[in-house]
Image: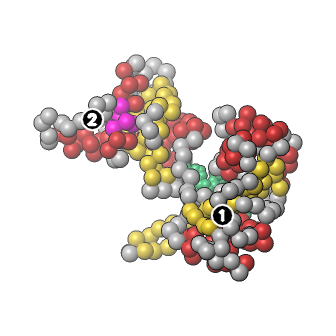
Amino acid sequence: MKFQKICVLGLGYIGLPTASTLAAHGFKVLGVDINPHVIETLQNGNVHIHEPGLRTVVESALNSGNLTVSSQPEEADAFLIAVPTPFYEDGYGEYDGRKFRLADMRAVTSATEAILPCLRKGNLVVLESTSPPRTTVDLVTPILERSGLKAGIDFFLCYSPERVLPLDMAVDIARGAIDKCRADGYRTTVAIIDAAGNLKLSARDDGTSPHTVEVARKKAYTALIYRRPSMDTAKAWATQVPPPSIEGTIALGGGFPIRAGDQVVGAIGVSGAPGQDKDEACANAGLAAVAARLK
Ligand SMILES: NC(=O)c1ccc[n+]([C@@H]2O[C@H](COP(=O)([O-])OP(=O)(O)OC[C@H]3O[C@@H](n4cnc5c(N)ncnc54)[C@H](O)[C@@H]3O)[C@@H](O)[C@H]2O)c1
């Protein structure tokens, strides 16, 4: 399959970096967004979202002529859908006796309908929005097959959800954790690592002991490696002599994996509060601060 032109629908935190990076690699990219402010801002050579390093990539993509933007898709070789899929505030469904929040799929529906008149034989359509199971089959396929083309035969269709821990989100998590600790009357250090275990940020509040920097990072690392709260690991090790620890891990509570949907995208560790349960409360407050974006 040879791609020359790619159409990216939804120019937000996921779609804009994707469109710009593809343009930087020589593809002709049409970025599409229904928000006129987004289109106008980009047409004026500005960037409407804040993400470290993004402005440089977007500017060079726009200046190269490889990235253009529009409110409407056009014929292309591939279409990437990166529109929002937020949870409804008070919409719930039930499965197996358990209650689940429902995702608002209207943007995916309208983006797919917008692709429909442009769809041609041999095209690739990729759903990148975080979506409930079967969305590609039950929602996207029937809309695209109204074209008379068959998915998997005449055009290709796949689901490839984005799973990233952007720096801005890491900053918001750290902010939420530090604010909670301060509100409870103590100062702590927060470490956030990415899915590969690399440090994303280390925020040491004023007056905390220097050792908390490394302890917070190790708590995060422990939560990442074992895919569970570091407290659970500490408890499991308490009965084993010697504890089966992996190098760089630590048997202390205050670390949690950061999950986007069912995938671990990083981990947080908090150190310095007078008690591991208090470190945990701060870490949880940090995760709660971005819960709506981590789904
Ligand atoms: N860490 C992760 O795994 C992760 C991170 C971010 C986003 N996501 C997922 O990626 C998707 C996009 O997220 P985002 O953060 O980029 O959202 P965003 O809100 O930053 O941007 C979405 C953009 O889509 C535009 N849009 C809405 N409806 C449209 C339509 N019908 N046609 C064209 N454009 C439309 C909006 O105007 C907006 O500019 C979501 O499903 C989100 O859950 C996953």
Camera-side residue: 79 or 203? 79
Q: Which residue bears the numbered disc 2?
A: 246
In the picture, the quarter occupied by the N terminus is bottom right
Q: Are there few (<14), some (14-19), or many (20+) residues within 10 Å of tag 1? A: many
Query: Quadrant of the rendered structure where residue 130 is?
Result: bottom right
Q: Which residue bears the numbered disc 1?
A: 124
Numbered badge on residue 214: none
Ligand 1's quadrant: bottom right
Q: Mark 1 vs mark 2: which is more N-terminal?
A: 1
Question: Horizontal placement of 257 versus 239: left or right?
Answer: right
Which amino acid is tagged 1? Leu
Question: Horizontal placement of 174 versus 142: left or right?
Answer: left
Q: Position of residue 232 (x, y in %)?
A: 28, 45
- For image coordinates 18% across by 36% down, the residue present is 243
Labels 1 & 2 near each other (Cβ < 8 A): no
Q: In this rendering, is residue 109 above or below 36?
A: below
Looking at the magenta stretch, what is its main secondary structure?
helix
Please, which residue is most extreme toward the front here? 1
- For image coordinates 22% across by 43% down, the residue present is 235
Q: Position of residue 242 (x, y in %)?
A: 14, 34
Asked if the beta carbon under badge 1 is closer than 8 A to the nearest atom of ligand 1, the reply is: no
Which amino acid is tagged 2? Ile
Q: Position of residue 259 (x, y in %)?
A: 46, 50
Q: In this rendering, is residue 121 above or below 7?
A: below
Q: Regarding mark 2 in the picture, which secondary structure is present there?
A: loop
Q: Are there few (<14), some (14-19), or many (20+) residues within 10 Å of tag 2? A: few
Q: Which residues are magenta?
A: 218-222
Is residue 265 in view? yes
- For image coordinates 44% across by 28% down, the residue present is 189
As measured in the structure, the alpha-carbon distance from the residue carrying label 1 to the one carrying label 2 is: 43 Å
